[in-house]
Amino acid sequence: MNIQGTYTNKGLALTAKTAAGACLRVTRVVGGSGHTADVPNAAQLPEIRQTLAVGEARCAGNTAVLPVTLAAVELGATYTLTELGVYAEDLNEGEILYCVYRLDEPVTIQAGSDTVLRFYLRQTVSKDGGAEVLCSPAGLITESDCGPVRRKVLATGVPSRAVTIPASELQAYLNSLPRLLTEHHDITLSGTNSDIVYVKDFHGYGSLSFHANNLGDCVFTRGFTLKNCSAPVIMEKLKWELGSNIPYGESCVYCSTSEVMARECSFTGYVSPNGGQVGRAATTVNCGCCDLWNCKFHNFEMVINCFGAGHIDIIETELGGEYGGSKYGVFTDLGGVAMLPDKVPATLGSGGNVTRNGGVIIQGGKFI
């Protein structure tokens, strides 16, 4: 779509005044379905259909750009847009038809629809009083442009996608996904991944599901970091075996301002040559939430760490879990909360728990 602007005689006279230093004040911009004859001598735009929203003009040197928006949502009747009319204030004449823009392709504006058209009307005035009027197509949004996005936003269901990939390619796959309209992603993994996996800024009504067909089919030797995700994350039958290269305090699952559910997963820390345990199974911070269902936990410095209002639930069904070989079981600090069922060891098979600065541990409805 292209449009071309033509001044009226009164508009051209006003343009000469602006070149001499007068201020140009646009009073309104209208859309019409007619065809203005003899534009230089025209006083009104025939067949006016609606008034457009006009934004603040941006000026640079002798050039001014006027953003104009046409929205169909409140229209009472459908019409065909063929031209735009710009009206301005002349101190001697009052309101005048300043210039007329004609579209090379008429556009149907459907009443009550979500159609939005954005125009940038550009005017350049030379020092000798000459003038040129152009319209930049940059930023022009048509129905065909915004339709696919609108359909996704207004959809009542969320599409599902299933893929099977090696664990080593998981980060590259995540980096290729859109973040704001997350779909249901069912990701089957296999093999080993020795790098940190970052899951960040996924939002929408979908979810991310990572799983292996059998426990041991997929092994991670570094942690998963989840940050700022409103889309929930589900893990199933994944195995972590932290290696000797992990830094102090690394967690198999680190969850900040996100929600993760792990089912039938295995978490194993690293035992250094001097016998010290390294790593954590799960850490939650900044109101992050982690549910661990029927999982196995062995050989950690601390099994779970709830910090800064982070929340972790250990959940057991008839499948049960495994615990042992860790220095600390539960560590809560700064309002962190850990919830344990009756059937699990209160210290998760470790030497003890730590609570401080408002952190709490609740087992079977009682504080411990």
Image: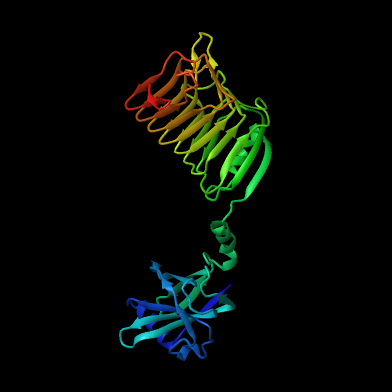
**Closest to the observer, 227 or 335:** 335
Determine the image quadrant of residue 354.
top left
* Rendered-image quadrant of the N terminus: bottom right
Residue 226 place in picture, x, y as percent: 50, 36
Let me know if residue 68 appears in the view.
yes
Q: Residue at x 37, y 83 (%)?
A: 14
Query: Is 226 placed left or right of 94 in the picture?
Result: right
Residue 253 place in picture, x, y as percent: 51, 29
The residue sitting at the left extreme is 91
Residue 176 place in picture, x, y as percent: 60, 44
Give above or below for 200 relative to 27: above
Let me know if residue 60 appears in the view.
no
Q: Residue at x 47, y 25 (%)?
A: 341
* Rendered-image quadrant of the C terminus: top left
Q: Residue at x 41, y 18 (%)?
A: 353
Q: How many marks?
A: 0
Determine the image quadrant of residue 305.
top left
**Closest to the observer, 46 or 305:** 305
